[in-house]
Amino acid sequence: MSVSNCGLADRLNKWVSLTPAERDALARLEDRPRTIRRGAVLMEEQARSDELFVVQQGMLMCYVLLDDGSRQVVRFLFPGDLFALSALVYARSPDTVVAVSNAVVCPFDRGQIAKLATEHPRLFSLILVLNQIERVITTDRLAGLGRTSARVRVATLLLSLRGQMRHAGMEVGTSFTPGLTQEEMGDAIGLTAVHVNRMLRQLEDDALIKREGGRVHLLDEAQLAREAGYIDRFEGLDLSWLPPGR
Amino acid sequence: MSVSNCGLADRLNKWVSLTPAERDALARLEDRPRTIRRGAVLMEEQARSDELFVVQQGMLMCYVLLDDGSRQVVRFLFPGDLFALSALVYARSPDTVVAVSNAVVCPFDRGQIAKLATEHPRLFSLILVLNQIERVITTDRLAGLGRTSARVRVATLLLSLRGQMRHAGMEVGTSFTPGLTQEEMGDAIGLTAVHVNRMLRQLEDDALIKREGGRVHLLDEAQLAREAGYIDRFEGLDLSWLPPGR
DNA sequence: CGATGTTTTGATCTTTTTCAACCAAAGTGG
DNA sequence: CCACTTTGGTTGAAAAAGATCAAAACATCG
């Protein structure tokens, strides 16, 4: 059981050393794995739902549709990510979740969270920590959309996708496969597919990246990160305040 | 003590009926009120800090500065809001916090949160709930920045500022005082001050709003909300899963 | 009253979108 | 296995949205 299935436990165990009871509790969140195929919609915006999920394998994305038909991708999900936590607050999902690649997700009941809250204060605290990290990442993206150029947004997207994959335990070196169409990229960073294409070409002409097939090579990572002002929000955490594990 | 000081307890008490012990615990978070003057910087981006805060009175904003000197306001704070929760994860603040009006805030230690986690599971759960609401609001803003026009963004800003004020227990009817310069508004919605001005004028010419002094009247709220696709994220919560209070 | 900061307006410039066409790769059905 | 459709990528030209620059009008506050 405890072999790396790339779920939540492995993610958390990098930060604290989980007790056997805690491992058990986490395992219970992931005891109903569900396989979904690329392109499948896991949850529709506005649909009733009271389940939360852990991603175990693959890549998914969350988006909202605006009145004029345009789409905004609000988040990409990778193994170890929790999602649909909004079910803790709203009866209807605020966004649509779709699988970008084949994937495995594990639904679990809201009641499990209440149980964690009373029986495993440290685990529950870690969920708050995850939430907090996400919030900071989302505000980084907010600043990117509000105040940076198309070129910088594309560079940032590449860096952050790779960063997320790395943190999810996928093997990624200086080259990786985003697995997104240029349209999807554009919807994530507020650009048209056409303009994403031009910016990718520009980055390639400037010898910052190289593309072949679906693969992207980051040729000058330092320069990219400098231009993008990219900060890895999974680095340098300080969790010394956490209550003891049970 | 329990008279409405517009702090966290009053906010939470609208959703659940707090036990005496819970009220006590919350009161302890707010036992060191600090008064700050309009314009004062409460916390600098990148500064070390391990305190969290509750807003008791007034209005503050959080922003980040980008490399090119531009600014993005990421959040406005009102009475009852928690902030600097990022201190639970990072040793350095990701953003700058400044008072937009004279204000009263209450700092408290990270350890208090750990204590809540073990002793008051329901309160701790409610903090997660607050966090979740914020996250959804932030993604709404993300979609706004990525995919909506300047006019819509200005309309949304007005509606959401008023919404936040109302939820903080301030008296606001169809007219209210944003208390922001047009530059600050622009920095919140990714526009220049000049363009904010033009959009405000346009909304006024279309008889959707009226301005006098610092006051804004929402003349046709229904139409504004329709154009903006505005959703009040403090409405319609479902907190039935919460563990019992202690 | 002078000094400073904010709002307003016009003119011009830049960035990004829109529209349209074409191409390559990958499926699909016969 | 081959036409055929579909999907995604690429490029150019024109249009639109918003930014930038500059100046003047207003406010506010010592």
Image (cartoon, coloured by chain):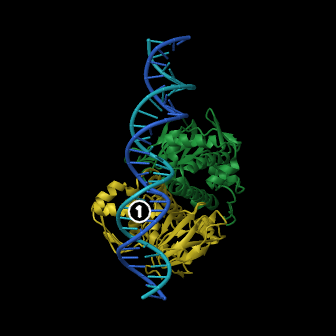
Chain colours: A green, B yellow, C cyan, D blue
Total count of labels: 1
Residue at the (52%, 47%) spot, across then down: A188
B197 relative position to B37: left or right = left
| Rendering coords of residue A171 (x, y %) | 70, 41
| Rendering coords of residue A38 (x, y %) | 54, 35
Residue at the (70%, 50%) spot, across then down: A222
| Rendering coords of residue A197 (x, y %) | 54, 39
| Rendering coords of residue A111 (x, y %) | 52, 54
Tell me if residue B138 comes above or below residue A36 in the rendering: below
Observer-nearest of A77 and C8: C8
Tell me if residue A135 comes above or below residue B79 in the rendering: above
The part of the image, by quadrant, that contains residue B117 is bottom right
Residue at the (38%, 67%) spot, across then down: B162
A22 relative position to B151: left or right = right
A215 relative position to C30: left or right = right
Helix, strand or loop under label 1: helix
Disc 1: which chain?
B
Observer-nearest of A230 and C18: C18
Q: Which residue is under mark 1?
A: B196
Q: Residue type at mark 1: give it.
A: Val
Observer-nearest of B193 and C11: C11
